Image (spheres, rainbow, N blue to C red):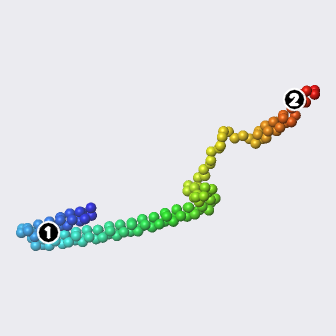
Amino acid sequence: MADEANSQLDSALNTLLSITEKSGNLRKDLKRDILDSVSTLRNTFVNLINSVEEQMAKIGLLESKVKKAKAELQGRIAADLSARYPPSRDGTGKTPATGVRHVLPTAGGAKEIYAEVARDSIEKDTRSCCSPSPINRQRQ
């Protein structure tokens, strides 16, 4: 696109120069003014193009610095996470990237409270040892 604009500008300025040279009715001082103006315009556009190219180079340099800083930050975040969380148990050595811990679903239905389980087992043991056996029932 810049090449197209550059060629259009060059064509327009050349047209002005050729009209100035072909025109026989133009005074010499007006011809000189037009030639000086065309020259000034050419120099101004060349300087403008050079300035734009310098700015684009600076932008490219800054973008590369930003990419490098982002990569360094990601490395520091990963190092911080690995120091903060224990190694994984699946042997892959990967830690959660987002710092979110995953909870495994419970096996089976609802959880039973230890006291209830212990009470039920004590009641079963008590019934079996204290209940009269068929032999004891016959003696009574």
For residue 99, what is the image quadrant?
bottom right
Q: Nearer the viewer, residue 64 or 8?
A: 64
Q: Residue furthest left?
A: 24
* Residue 85 appears in view: no
In the visual, does 98 lie left or right of 109? left
Q: Residue at x 84, y 35 (%)?
A: 128
Q: Look at mark 1 in the image and give the residue it sits on.
A: 17
- The numbered dot on residue 131 is none
Inspect the image, locate mark 1, and give the three-letter code of the amino acid beneath it. Leu
Q: Residue at x 65, y 43 (%)?
A: 107
Give the residue drawn at x 8%, y 68%. 22
- In percent of width and height, residue 24 lies at 6, 69
Residue 110 visible to an observer of this rendering: yes
**93 horizontally vs 58: left or right:** right
The number of numbered badges drawn on the structure is: 2
Q: Is residue 68 left or right of residue 35?
A: right
| Nearer to us in this view, 98 or 20 | 98
Residue sitting farthest toward the right: 139
Residue carrying label 2: 134
Closest to the camera, between mark 2 and mark 1, is 2
- Where is residue 74 drawn, in percent x and y? 52, 62
Q: Which quadrant does the C terminus fall into?
A: top right
Q: Quadrant of residue 88?
A: bottom right
Return the x and y of residue 91 as percentages of the image width and height.
60, 58
- Lower sequence index among marks 2 and 1: 1
Q: Amino acid at mark 2?
A: Pro
Note whether 40 is above or below 127 in the view shown.
below
Give the position of the N terminus as an image quadrant: bottom left
Answer with the quarter of the image where residue 12 lies.
Answer: bottom left
Q: Secondary structure at mark 1?
A: helix
Is residue 87 found left or right of 72 in the rendered image?
Answer: right
